[in-house]
Amino acid sequence: MKLKQRRKLVTYLNILDQPVRFNPFVFSRTFLLWALLGLIGGIIAGIYWIGLEFLTHQLAFFNGWQVIPVMAICGLLAGLVIHFIGDPGEIHLIVNNIRFNKGKLDPRNNPSMILSSLLCVASGGSLGPEAPLVQVTGSTGTWLGKLLRLKGEELRSLSIAGMASGFTALFGAPLGGSLFSLEILHHKHAVEYYKAIIPAFVSSCFSYLVFALIIHLGLGPVWDLSAYEYSGIFDFGYAVLFAAVGATFGWAFIFCTKFFKSLFEKKPIPIYIKTLIGGILLGVIAFYFPITRYFGHHEINELLSGNFSLTLLFAILIFKIIAISITVTSGWRGGFIIPLFFVGATLGLIIHQLFPTINLSLAIVSCMAAINACVTRTPMSTTILLATLTGFGHFIPILFASLTGYFLAPKIPFIGSQMEKE
C-alpha cells in the first residue's frame, strides 16, 4: 500500500474513532440547558396556577360586604409575610437587577413572593400573577446559571430566558413572551439584550408546552371578541385615533399611581399596615363594583358579554384605574399587564357606545394595546400578545395602536429602572 493511501486510511480511521458531532448551534449543551429551564419554568407556572385557582375558589365563597374584611385580612397577612420573610421587590427591582446587577435575580426572595402574591391575587387584588411568575422563573434561571458557574452575558441570558418562560406560560405566546422579557428591560435599547432572544424563545416554547399539558391554559384566544372584518385603509386611522384615547388613560393611570404613592409614603409605616389599608380600600371598591375585583383574566369576558350602561362603564373604568393604583402602591404583589388590558377593554366599550357605527373589536383591541404600550413601553410584544389572546386576525392595526401608545407615553417611564443608567 502506498504511503499516500496509508495516510488517508489513518485519517479515516481517526475520524471514525471520534464521537459523532452534531451542529453545535442546534444540539449544543446550551440548547438543552435552555430547554431544561423552560421545562422547569412551565412546571413552576403550572403548580403556581393550580394553587392560585384553588385559593381563589376558596376565597370566592365570600361575597357582598364580606369582601371587605376578607381582602383586609389577606392584605394584612401578605404584609406580614413580606415583613418577616423578606421583601421580594417589584417589577422595578427585577428590571434593575437584570440591567445593572449582571443579570442576577435572588432566588431567596421566592418564598415571600409566592406566598404574598398568592394572597394578593387570589383575594381579589387588581394585579395579576405574571410578575410573580417572572420573578420566580427568572431567579430559577439565575440559580441554574450559578450552579453551572456561568458568568457575564451567559448568566444574564439564562435569567432572561427564565423570565420569558414564566411570562409565556401564563399568556400562551412564546414569541410575545420572549420579546416582552427583552423590551421590558429597556424601551430604547432593547437590542443590547437581543443576545438572549434565542435562549428566551427556546425556553418559552418548552415552558408553553409543559404549562399547556398541565392545565390547558393559553390554547387559543382567551377573550371572546366579535369577528372583525377589514373595511378599508381608514381602519388604520381609527386604530391610531382610539390608541390616542387609550394613551390618555395610560397617563391617567400613571398620575393616579403617583398620587396614591405620595399618600402611602407620606409617613413611614410598616408594610403590613400599608397592605391592610390597601385591602380595606380595595374591598370597598369590590363591594360596590364586583367586576373590578381580581386581575381581569375572566372578568374581561364577563365585561364583553355583559350589557352595561354607559354610566356604569365609566364608573368601572375610573374605579378599576383607582383599584390598580392602590394595589400597586400599597405593597400588594402582582403584575399590572392584564389589569391594564381590562381598562382598555372597558374604554373600547365606552367608545363603541358613544359611536355605535365604529367596529367594536377594533376599538377594544386598539385601546388595550395603547394603554399597555404607554405604561410598559413594550409595543412589539404587546402586539403579539394581543393578537394571540384575542384572536384578532389582522396584525397591522394592533401594531399601529401599540406604536401610537408607545410614542405618546410620558418622557419619564412608569417603570423607573427602564431609564438610562446615570
Image: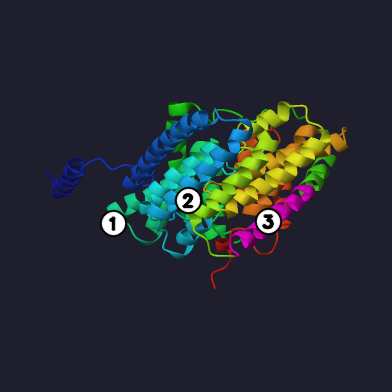
Inter-mark Cα distance, 3 to 2: 24 Å
Secondary-structure class at tag 3: helix
- Mark 1 = which residue? 149
Residue 42 badge: none
Inter-mark Cα distance, 2 to 1: 35 Å
Q: Is residue 184 visible?
A: yes
For the record, the magenta segment spans 244-266
Amino acid type, label 3: Ile
Counting residues from the start of the chain, the first of labels 3 and 2 encountered is 2
The percent coordinates of residue 3 (x first, y second) are 13, 49
Counting residues from the start of the chain, the first of labels 1 and 3 encountered is 1
Q: Is residue 278 above or below residue 345?
A: below
- Mark 2 = which residue? 79
Left/right placement of residue 350 relative to residue 189 reads right
- Mark 3 = which residue? 254
Around disc 1, counting alpha carbons within 10 Å, would you say few (fewer than 14), some (14 to 19), or many (20 or more)? few
Image point (38%, 49%), residue name? 141
Q: Which one is closest to the eye, mark 2 or mark 1?
A: 2
Image point (48%, 41%), residue name? 119
Secondary-structure class at tag 2: helix
Inter-mark Cα distance, 1 to 3: 40 Å
Q: Quadrant of residue 417?
A: bottom right
Counting residues from the start of the chain, the first of labels 2 and 1 encountered is 2
Q: Is residue 225 visible?
A: no
Image point (47%, 47%), residue name? 78
